């Protein structure tokens, strides 16, 4: 069975308590349950990861790129958090690993601070889901699944 990985970057472990007026009251554990249920409905195994450490995220991205090449994974739904705006190391990891990514953000970053409007990840993403709250993760999972079908990577 094909798999999908949902990766969350820095501070997303604080979902439910950090700025609930922006990110809502849903916890990361709730998001994980939502993603696993949705992925399963599409016939996908899922892995759910979160780290506040750039190097850990890069290591996961490298491993996932290899899993995609081996046909074991269709790619990642990735909420890079603040790394969105400045982590060229993560950008280069995604590019180097040839990892299909759907960049995902809970809030509408374009309706917030000016510095949040630029993403170094977006130019490499297969798609971007922004501003739908946590349901955006399900939209991203579906999007990556449909792209993998269109590419012939899953039946």
Image (cartoon, grey):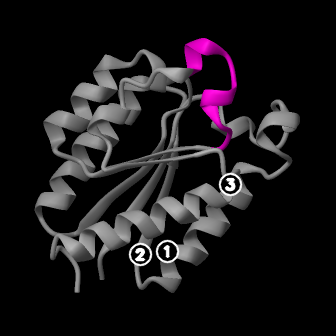
**Range of magenta residues:** 106-116
Image depth: mark 1 or mark 2 in front: 1
> Given contact means CB atoms under 8 Å apart, are the residues at marks 1 and 2 in contact?
yes
Q: Position of residue 150 (x, y in %)?
A: 22, 74
Task: Give above or below for 102 relative to 36.
Answer: above
- The residue positioned 17% from the left and 70% from the top of the image is 151
Q: Does residue 88 appear left or right of residue 9 in this picture?
A: left
Q: Position of residue 79 (x, y in %)?
A: 51, 41
Q: Secondary structure at mark 2?
A: strand
Image depth: mark 2 or mark 3 in front: 3
76 inside magenta stretch: no
The residue carrying pointer 1 sits among few (fewer than 14), some (14 to 19) or many (20 or more) residues within 10 Å by Cα, namely many
Rendered image: mark on residue 45: 2
Task: Give above or below for 85 relative to 79.
Answer: above
Rendered image: mark on residue 39: 1
Q: Does residue 76 appear left or right of residue 25 in this picture?
A: left
- The residue positioned 70% from the left and 50% from the top of the image is 133
The quarter of the picture where the C terminus appears is bottom left
Q: Does residue 56 appear left or right of residue 26 in this picture?
A: left
- The residue positioned 57% from the left and 20% from the top of the image is 116
Q: Secondary structure at mark 3?
A: loop
Q: Secondary structure at mark 1?
A: helix
As rendered, which of 88 and 5 lies closer to the eye?
A: 88
Number of numbered markers: 3
Q: Which residue is mark 3?
A: 134
Residues at marks 1 and 3, CA–CA distance in whole angstroms: 14 Å
């Amino acid at each position: 069975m094909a798999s999908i990985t949902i990766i969350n970057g820095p501070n997303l472990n604080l979902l439910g308590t950090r700025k609930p007026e922006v990110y809502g009251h849903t916890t990361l554990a709730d998001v994980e349950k939502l993603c696993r249920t949705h992925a399963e409905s599409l016939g996908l195994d899922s892995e759910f990861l979160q780290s506040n450490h750039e190097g850990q995220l890069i290591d996961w991205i490298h491993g996932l790129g290899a899993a995609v090449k081996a046909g074991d994974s269709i790619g990642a739904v990735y909420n890079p958090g603040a790394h969105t705006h400045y982590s060229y190391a993560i950008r280069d990891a995604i590019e180097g690993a040839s990892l299909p990514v759907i960049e995902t953000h809970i809030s509408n970053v374009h309706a917030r601070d000016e510095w949040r409007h630029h993403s170094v990840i977006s130019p490499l993403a297969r798609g971007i889901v922004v501003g739908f709250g946590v349901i955006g993760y399900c939209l991203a999972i579906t999007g990556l699944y449909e792209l993998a079908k269109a590419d012939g990577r899953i039946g």
